């Protein structure tokens, strides 16, 4: 508990702001602040300025809603990417994860979450209408639903599937469900095991990769 | 692992700076940065500005070396405090801890650590000479050694004790060693138990508190 008057209002202010970050309590915030005070002045100023610059400078791509510093993000603007395939993800972080796989050369669409009525998140809170608009242009061949394999993710998948059903020539796919690489069968749940059996693939294909 | 090009250099810069903080890896830094991006713009700017203001504005008290926004910190400048008693502590955080006890009305002296030859911290890296100077003024009645009960803390206690020995009329005390409040005897080490026996206090005194 730190309830005494801090020796410095400036320190107290910084601790208060730092402790608003997720997973950072007042004790940790104080530890961080004192670290910043001990370290080189330039480094502390650079940290603060980088946060301000990021918050002021980063916007969202008008097309895919990924973070961007320009109206259209570098991925959407990249002419060497397949602009007829859209991978629908929940968050900006998911875009980074899929980019890190090096397995995808299409474009993204960041929903901003999944439908979760319990948390007050309905379809209108998400970027679903703008996804439908992108598909409605007729320039899209495939929409990959890459949402979490949770109840909310599946619900959102189904909602989007119904919204896109009218576009007959658009293929709607979803991520494969199966045993996670590195996981033991013993600890894999039965639903996943069942799906992995149903969707089994040719062994020879896995060797070729 | 986040080794791909970030969608935004500004984001990458902020993540890099955040990940320099202790206990914050690149993954956590990214989580914090994305949180800042999702939150209100003013809040993010306020966080960054508070860090800059703190780093630029906070100095150290010329007398006790606690953090301060002025040459002399509020504790040293407070005329209602007992300026003839100095409590010697390791860090700025320790000052806060002792202030939170509400049991001390004297002044402090922040050493900046303890003597630790293994870490390259000798007496000259610490504010020991300035402590001797304060005592040499003749205005001090008691110096309380409030360092950690570790090997390094005890070494530092002894070093300071020897430095202050020439000042015959200054009482040098140290924190009581004993069973921590709330701890069970079963899990208390023998050295502490031995010290707590030797330094036992009148039970009636503990009732009066």
Image (cartoon, coloured by chain):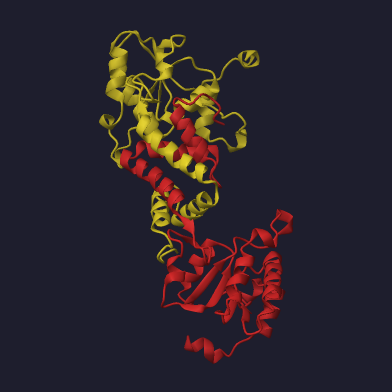
Chain colours: A red, B yellow
Does residue A24 lie above or below B1 as drawn? Answer: above
**Residue nearest the viewer, comparing A171 with B208:** A171
How far across and how far down the image is residue B64, in percent? 36, 21
Judge whether B39 appears above or below B169 on screen: below
Quadrant of the drawing holding the N terminus of chain B: bottom left
| Residue at screen point 47% across, 22% down | B175
Which x, y percent locates residue B134?
Answer: 31, 15
Q: Residue at x 41, y 65 (%)?
A: B3
Q: Residue at x 34, y 25 (%)?
A: B158
Q: Is residue B44 above or below residue B150?
A: below
Q: Is residue B173 visible?
A: no
Which is more toward the observer, B26 or B6? Answer: B6
Viewer-closest of B127 and A192:
A192
Residue A114 falls left or right of residue B20: right
Quarter assignment of residue A143: bottom right
From where the camera sits, is residue B75 visible?
Answer: yes
Q: Residue A135 at x, y = what percent?
A: 60, 75
B129 relative position to A55: left or right? left
Question: Which quadrant, please, contains the C terminus of chain B?
Answer: top right
């Amino acid at each position: 508990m730190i309830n005494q008057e801090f020796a410095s209002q400036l320190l107290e202010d910084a601790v208060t702001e730092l402790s608003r970050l997720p997973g950072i309590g007042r004790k940790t915030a104080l530890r961080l602040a004192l670290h910043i005070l001990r370290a080189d002045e330039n480094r502390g100023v650079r940290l603060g300025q980088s946060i301000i610059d990021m918050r002021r400078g980063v916007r969202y791509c008008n097309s895919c809603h990924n973070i961007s510093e320009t109206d259209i993000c570098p991925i959407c603007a990249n002419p060497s990417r397949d602009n007829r395939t859209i991978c629908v993800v929940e968050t900006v972080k998911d875009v980074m994860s899929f980019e890190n796989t090096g397995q995808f050369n299409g474009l993204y669409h960041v929903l901003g979450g999944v439908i979760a009525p319990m948390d007050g998140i309905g379809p209108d809170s998400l970027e679903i209408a703008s996804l439908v608009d992108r598909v409605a242009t007729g320039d899209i061949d495939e929409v990959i639903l890459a949402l979490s394999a949770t109840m909310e993710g599946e619900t959102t998948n189904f909602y989007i599937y119904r919204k896109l059903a009218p576009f007959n020539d658009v293929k709607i796919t979803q991520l494969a469900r199966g045993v996670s690489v590195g996981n033991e069968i013993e600890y894999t749940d039965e639903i996943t095991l069942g799906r992995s059996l149903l969707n089994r693939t040719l062994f020879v294909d896995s060797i070729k990769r």
